Image (spheres, grey):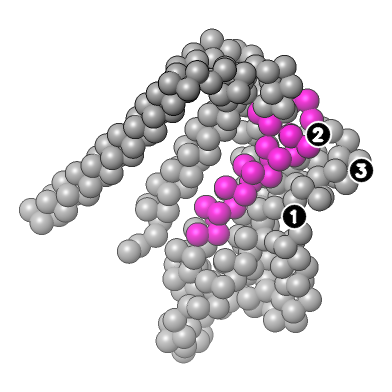
Amino acid sequence: MAESSRIRLLGEGWFGGLAVQVALLGAVLALWYVLVVGFDVPEWQLPTPARIFGSMVNDFTTIAPHLLSTSRNVLLGFFISVALGLSLAIVIYFNAPVGMTITPFINLMCIIPLITIVPLLMLWLGFGNEAKLIAVVLQSFPIVNLNAFASFSNVDPLRLELMQSLKATRYQTMRCCVLPDAMPGIFTGVKLAAILALIAEVTSEIVGGNTGLGAQIIQYTQYMKMPQAFACVFYTALFGALFHQSLSFIERQLVKK
């Protein structure tokens, strides 16, 4: 009985939060429409939300291949970043000398602005997906690595002592003790990496490229096709929101509160 009440309360909280978000979004769009119409803002400067949503529907067949290109690179680069970041974090955790050697370089990747690297990648690798994919990985995997290693380092020492007293191997310690305890921190890095992956991909497309939502935004803007440009922006935001919510759903299933 208590469990069913808890599930009902969680559902009510979820739907209530969603209703508030939808209402707030509707209010923002309504204010946007009123200001654009009231001040007679020309469409080439700022279109109304209705024109943008109309473009999202009417121009979908044109935008869809670019949406697919962007999402494919983001997802592939994200999964590579997560695998690389977690693997390096595990190596650093069990081998301090390796960590002392490579951690400064990982920190350096977090500091250097991506936009300064993308032109060099384009020069070396061309304007294809390879340069964009590498940019996504370089931007995303350091945050996964740093959050994972920090989470590994903050595992309850009593649990580690228990594993040692049971003569557990490194693999058993990692699987049964370290990973479950560090999972919330790991997912913090993973969700941040998802955001950075999308930013890196769209930035790479804007800097140089003929495919992807970023490239389309530049192209539409140059020809003053602002409804289409904003449609690409909205599709980017929609993809990012769905991606982040999917990771949050996975986190709720895996992380024990």
Answer whether residue 207 is magenta in the image. Answer: yes
Answer whether residue 89 is magenta in the image. Answer: no
Q: Magenta region: which residues? A: 188-214
- Residue 150 x/y as whole percent: 56, 73
Instruction: Check disc 3 and give the amino acid type.
Output: Trp
Q: Residue at x 69, y 79 (%)?
A: 95
Q: Residue at x 78, y 37 (%)?
A: 207
Q: Tell whether 46 sits left or right of 24.
A: right
Image: 140 above or below 133: below
Residue occupied by mark 2:
208
Using a 10 Å C-alpha cutoff, classify the residue at mark 3 as few (fewer than 14 neighbours), some (14 to 19) or many (20 or more). few
Callout count: 3
Closer to the chain start, of discs 3 and 2, is 3
Label 2 residue SS? loop
Marks 3 and 2, how far apart at CA: 13 Å
Snapshot quadrant of residue 190: bottom right
Residue occupied by mark 3:
124
Q: Tell whether 87 sits left or right of 34.
A: right
Residue 102 visible (yes or no): yes
Image: 69 above or below 195: above
Instruction: Check disc 2 and give the amino acid type.
Output: Gly
Task: Give the label, 3 or 1, closer to the camera.
Answer: 1
- Residue 13 x/y as whole percent: 23, 47
- Residue 17 x/y as whole percent: 28, 44
Residue occupied by mark 1:
113
Image: 112 above or below 17: below
Instruction: Check disc 1 and give the amino acid type.
Output: Pro
